[in-house]
Every structure is written in C-alpha cells, then in structure tokens.
Image: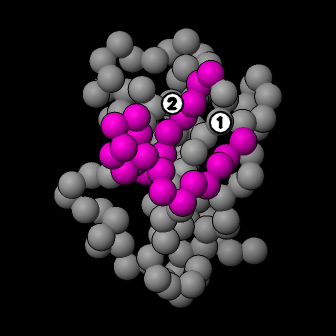
C-alpha cells in the first residue's frame, strides 16, 4: 500500500545522527527536496509533523498514488527521512511502471533494499 510503518526493532531509536547537525558524523545529506521529478511529472514531497495511517498508527512515510504526493514524517534524523523518501519513491516508480510485485511483503523488501542502497550511495559522495 506504500505505507511505511516504524519498525519495532528500533532503527530510529539507535540513530545517533538524530540530534547532531548535518556533517558532524561525516554524513553529508541535503535537506529533502520539495518535489521529485518523475517520468509523468513532478511529485510533491510533503513533510508532516505527526504522520499516521488510517488506523491512527504512526508511520514513517507514504506514497499517495491518487494525489501523486509523497509524505514523510518529520523525524529528527535526516538519514531516516531520506531513506523513507527513497522507499516511497520506489513504490511510486514501481507503480508508474506497472511493475508492482503481487506480494506486498516482497514490494516492501524491494523498496527497503533499493532505498538503503541509494541513501548509502548518496552519503558516500564526496563533499563539494
Ligand atoms: Zn512501503
């Protein structure tokens, strides 16, 4: 469904970059973009303070295909925000391409794997 829920195992709770300014741990990530370009037009990225699903459970992010908007929870960690944005973006890319896996768990794993790889790549770029 494109809804990303916080994991119970707590990758956020352990995230040391949460309260540090960008760069203090060698991490160089820009702020999230206001929109991302896609093959069929820009998709706005909305950062939401307290993002919840239809059951009022807290979530990290979601892709809203009807509105063509990505929402990301306003989390202190930029790494988690970026990983969530990339995760939701993979949902969008798969959907636009008509390539959504039939098994939702498989889709979530694909989104997690590709998002993590993209953020690691982004973080390992040399500073300008
Ligand atoms: Zn997802």
9 left or right of 113 in image: left
Q: Which one is nearer the viewer's eye here, 56 or 64? A: 56
Q: Residues within 10 Å of mark 2 (few under 14, many from 20)?
A: many
For the residues bearing labels 1 and 2, Cβ distance under 8 angstroms: no
- What is the quadrant of residue 95 in the picture? top right
Residue ID at (51%, 30%): 91
Q: Which residues are magenta?
A: 44-66
Residue ID at (28%, 28%): 105
For disc 2, the marked residue is 91
Q: Earlier in the sequence, mark 1 or mark 2?
A: 1
41 left or right of 93 in image: right
For disc 1, the marked residue is 69
- Vertically, is 74 above or below 35? below
Q: Residues within 10 Å of mark 1 (few under 14, many from 20)?
A: many
Name the quadrant of the N terminus.
top left
Residue 78 on image: x %, y %: 53, 67
Colour option used: one colour
Residue 89 on image: x %, y %: 57, 38
- Vertically, is 9 above or below 59? below
Q: Nearer the viewer, mark 1 or mark 2?
A: 1
- Vertically, is 15 above or below 41? below
Q: Label 1: state its secondary structure.
A: strand
Q: Is mark 2 within 8 Å of ligand 1?
A: yes
Residue ID at (40%, 34%): 54
Q: Which mark is residue 102?
A: none
Can residue 1 be spotted in the picture? yes
């Amino acid at each position: 469904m494109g809804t990303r829920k916080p994991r119970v195992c707590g990758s956020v709770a352990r995230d040391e970059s949460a309260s540090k300014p960008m760069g203090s741990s060698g991490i160089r990530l820009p702020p999230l973009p206001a929109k991302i370009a896609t093959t069929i037009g820009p998709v706005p990225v909305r950062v939401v303070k307290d993002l919840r699903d239809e059951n009022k459970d807290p979530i990290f992010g979601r892709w809203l295909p009807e509105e063509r908007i990505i929402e990301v929870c306003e989390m202190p960690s930029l790494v988690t925000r970026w990983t969530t944005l990339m995760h939701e973006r993979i949902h969008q890319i798969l959907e636009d391409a008509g390539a959504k896996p039939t098994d939702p768990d498989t889709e979530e794993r694909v989104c997690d794997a590709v998002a993590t790889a993209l953020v690691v790549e982004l973080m390992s770029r040399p500073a300008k």
